[in-house]
Structure formats: C-alpha cells, structure tokens
Image (spheres, rainbow, N blue to C red):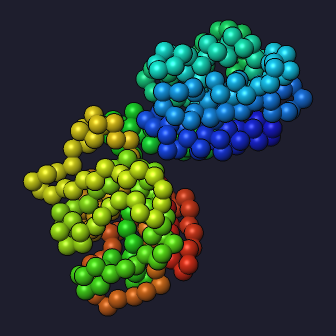
C-alpha cells in the first residue's frame, strides 16, 4: 500500500503538467511499474484531443522493457476511459498491453465513464484496485467533477482585506495585495476559465481582470448587475468549468447567501484603515485547506 501511494503521488504530480492544455478534459497522470518496483513508463494528458495519460505512458516504455508488461502495474490518477471520443478507449489499450494490475486513484464521474472502464478491465481478468489517494485525486479535478455533477462552473470567491476586515479605505479603492500576491492572483486567472465582478466594481475600479504578471490565457470577463444576472446554465453551455468572483462585498455576499461557492480565497494584509466596506462574512461550513504568508500578507483558502 505504501508503494501504491508513492506511485499514485507521482501520477498526481505528472497530471498537474496538463493544467493549461488538457481542458476541458481532466488532468490525468499514469505510471507503469515493473514487478521489481522500477518505473518503466510514465505520461500525462498533455492536450485535449491528443493521447491520454495511459497512451503516453505506454509509449514511453522502451522496447527492451516491453517484456515486463505482463507482470507490471499501471497507476492512473483517474479511471481509464471506456468510450470512443477524440481518442480510442484507454481501457482497451491497457487490456491489449496485458498488464497484470491496474491501480486507480478515483472513479471518473463523467457520464460516459462512471465505472465502466474499471468494469471492462475486471471482465478482462485484470486485477483492479480503486481509491488509492482518492481524496487527492478527486481534488485534482474538482473543477471537472463539479462542472459535470452540478452542471455549473466550479466557483472561487476571492477578496483581499485589511487586518481589521475592510476591503477598501473609506469606500475608495486601496492597494491591499503586495507585488507577490498580485502575481499569484494573475496565476490564478491564467488557470481558470472566467472571472466576474459586479457593475459597481466595474464602474468604480475599472479592473482589467486579465493576466499581466503571469504567462497564460486571460479568463473570460463577466460583469453582472440586476439587469444582467448571472446565468449558470449559460456558463455551463459555453463549457466554462471554473469561475473566479472578484466583485465587491455585495456581489461576493450574494454568492455566499445563495450557497454558490466551492472555494474561497482571502488575502489579509497587516495594514489597517478606520472606515470603509466590511469584508464578507465567511460561511459557517468553510474549512481551511491552506494558509500561507507571502511578504507579510496571508492567503487562506477555504473549501466546504
């Protein structure tokens, strides 16, 4: 079991390399290990429409190591697909290669898979173990799973506040983030599909909402108000899997009150002001998953 977890961690590490280009597909990593515990092939899903992680892992096996496959184990962070999409089923490839054992991090919740890949492998006589580092593997593709399960984007609420809980200074914009945390904000934007603010923030602050301090695509820009409310069905139809909400307190609070959030990121500086707009109140079911300090500012991430 210890070795299984070690190799699954490598799968997760590999999978993250596909964060930018695998979308809208999930991030997946695969590692092939010989009977003596040596990695003989590994790969990840590099780009949507191209080979999946398992395909790339088998392609990485050298000709002299091919003979080791009948006694080998392939580790995959997400259940191998069993359907024809832009590429053939990975479950069929695994069966064809004749490996002895398959270790899967988590089940694929996508309607075309949902356990069918595992069923196919077992029916072919391959030993399959499911659920190694399951929570970590599920968290890796939480955007993908939320999108297919809830038919809406994964929603990240984000704000910066002073040490005494204000998001502006006497109701005027104030720079709370430092240069490093600003860069992290742009990194987040490059990783998510869309970003949203309310009309008041748009008119008062004129935020650019793009990626300037990080390399990557800018998220789709959205502005809402009473005349133009958020339409989650429309976002789902346009294949937007993740949404950052960076609006003012009223916009952020409206999402919290409607229970429309999956993650909350709060940056707190050591500066104080004497008056202004109070930061939103965190929901009661928000649990801390990380807390880090960058040049004096602390960023805390909450999930349910």
Q: Seen in the image, is 127 located left or right of residue 286?
A: right
Q: Nearer the viewer, residue 285 or 98?
A: 98
**Whether residue 122 is visible:** no
Determine the residue located farthest toward the right in the rendered image: 36
Determine the residue located farthest toward the top in the rendered image: 124
Residue 150 sits in quarter: top left
Q: Seen in the image, is 19 located left or right of residue 284?
A: right
Q: In the image, what residue occupies the spot 70% across and 24% down?
A: 59
Where does the N terminus fall, quadrant-wise?
Answer: top right
Q: Seen in the image, is 130 located left or right of residue 260?
A: right
Residue 126: % across, % down: 72, 14
**Whether residue 278 is visible:** yes
Determine the residue located farthest toward the left in the rendered image: 227
Residue 243: % across, % down: 35, 50
Residue 142: % across, % down: 48, 43
Q: In the image, what residue occupies the spot 77% across and 25% down?
A: 61
Residue 140 sits in quarter: top right
Q: Is residue 114 above or below residue 289?
A: above
Residue 272 sits in quarter: bottom left
Q: Is residue 80 above or below residue 250?
A: above
Residue 200: % across, % down: 18, 68
Q: In the image, what residue occupies the spot 37% across and 53% down?
A: 218
Q: State how many labels appear.
A: 0
Q: In the image, what residue occupies the spot 52% across and 34% down?
A: 47
Q: Is residue 187 above or below residue 123?
A: below
């Amino acid at each position: 079991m210890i070795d299984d977890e070690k190799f699954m961690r490598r799968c997760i590490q590999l999978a993250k390399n596909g964060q930018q280009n695998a979308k809208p597909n999930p991030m997946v990593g695969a590692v092939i290990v010989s009977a003596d515990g040596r990695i003989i092939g590994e790969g990840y899903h590099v780009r949507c429409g191209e080979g999946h992680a398992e395909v790339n892992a088998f392609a990485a096996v050298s000709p002299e190591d091919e003979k080791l496959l009948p006694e080998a184990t392939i580790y995959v962070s997400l259940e191998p697909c069993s359907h024809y999409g832009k590429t053939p089923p990975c479950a069929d490839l695994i069966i064809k290669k004749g490996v002895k054992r398959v270790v899967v991090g988590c089940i694929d919740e996508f309607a075309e898979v949902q356990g069918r890949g595992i069923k196919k492998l077992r029916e072919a006589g391959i030993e399959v173990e499911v659920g190694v580092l399951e929570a970590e593997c599920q968290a890796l593709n939480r955007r993908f799973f939320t999108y297919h399960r809830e038919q809406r984007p994964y929603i990240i609420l984000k704000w910066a506040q002073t040490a005494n809980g204000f998001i502006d200074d006497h109701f005027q914009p104030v720079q709370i983030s430092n240069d490093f945390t600003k860069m992290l904000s742009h990194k987040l934007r490059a990783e998510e599909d869309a970003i949203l603010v309310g009309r008041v923030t748009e008119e008062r602050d004129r935020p650019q909402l793009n990626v300037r301090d990080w390399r990557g695509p800018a998220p789709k820009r959205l502005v809402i108000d009473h005349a133009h409310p958020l339409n989650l069905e429309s976002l789902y139809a346009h294949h937007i899997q993740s949404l950052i909400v960076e609006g003012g307190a009223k916009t952020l609070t409206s999402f919290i009150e409607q229970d429309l959030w999956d993650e909350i990121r709060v940056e707190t500086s050591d500066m104080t002001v004497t008056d202004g707009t109070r930061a939103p109140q965190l929901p009661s079911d928000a649990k801390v998953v990380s807390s880090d300090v960058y040049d004096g500012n602390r960023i805390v991430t909450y999930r349910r």
